[in-house]
Amino acid sequence: MKLMPSFFRKPKKQSNVPYYLCGGMVLLLVIGIWVFLKTKNQDNFECKSLPAAEKIQQADLIVSGKVFLVLADGPENAKVLFTADKIYKGQMPEGGIEIFAKQSTAIKNPSTNCELHFASNNQEYLLYLKKGEDGLFTTSKCFGSRLLGNGLSSEEFSILGEGQVVNQT
């Protein structure tokens, strides 16, 4: 019997099952993480019922006014140009108010979703706005934004007051 170096010897038959199991487990883990992150970033969450005082505190800008124009920004997103009549909190931005929103066709279930449907049809809105890093504002029903309807609630009025009329020049 000749002795051969180990790299010339025929390897023993080994099972590849442990490698397949490890690979499958890693694949399942990656898919699980991807699904978790995807669902975490979706806006299909339910609004927490916060008192008006907390909603007001969280907002960067609170205004009332009308939608000037809604522009499609991709298949699901929209930019809403808003003309403010009154400011209740914050400072009016120099370039006006531009809001990032979802198009009505992208809102899955409007009755349970926090997205506010904007239309430029002379309806008055009360908007609680948060400013993003990109300079655009975001809002939702969860923040307190809504059609103004009968005006401020008594709790909102006691905190915000009459508001400051915006100079439309």
Image: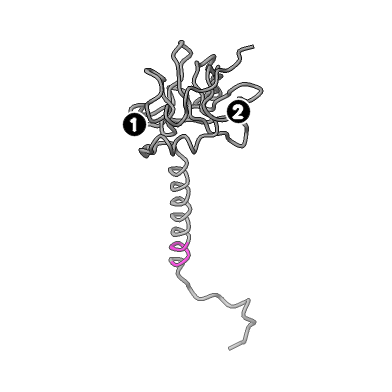
The x and y percentages for residue 156 are: 42, 29
The residue indicated by pointer 2 is 91
Q: Which label was assigned to residue 112? A: 1
Give the residue at the far right of this rendering. Answer: 94
Say which amino acid is labelled 1. Answer: Thr
Q: Nearer the viewer, residue 165 or 113?
A: 165
Residue located 46% across and 23% down the image: 126
Say which amino acid is labelled 2. Answer: Gln
Q: Which label was assigned to residue 99? A: none
Q: Which of 120 and 41 is in front in this view?
A: 120
Q: Is mark 2 on a helix, strand or loop?
A: loop
Residue located 37% across and 26% down the image: 153
Residue located 45% across and 11% down the image: 121
Q: Is mark 1 on a helix, strand or loop?
A: loop
Q: Quadrant of residue 107?
A: top left
For the N terminus, which image quadrant? bottom right
Residue count near mark 1 (Cα–Cα under 10 Å), binned few <14, some 14–19, many ≥20: few
Residue located 44% across and 59% down the image: 25
Whether tag 1 and tag 2 are in contact, CB under 8 A, the answer is no
Q: Nearer the viewer, residue 145 or 79?
A: 145
135 up-or-down from 34: above or below: above
The x and y percentages for residue 122 are: 46, 10
The x and y percentages for residue 61 are: 54, 30
142 up-or-down from 18: above or below: above
Q: Mark 1 to mark 2: distance in Å?
A: 31 Å
Tell which circle, 1 or 2, labels the residue nearer the N-terminal end: 2
The x and y percentages for residue 2 are: 61, 87
Give the residue at the far bottom of this rendering. Answer: 1
The magenta stretch is 18-22
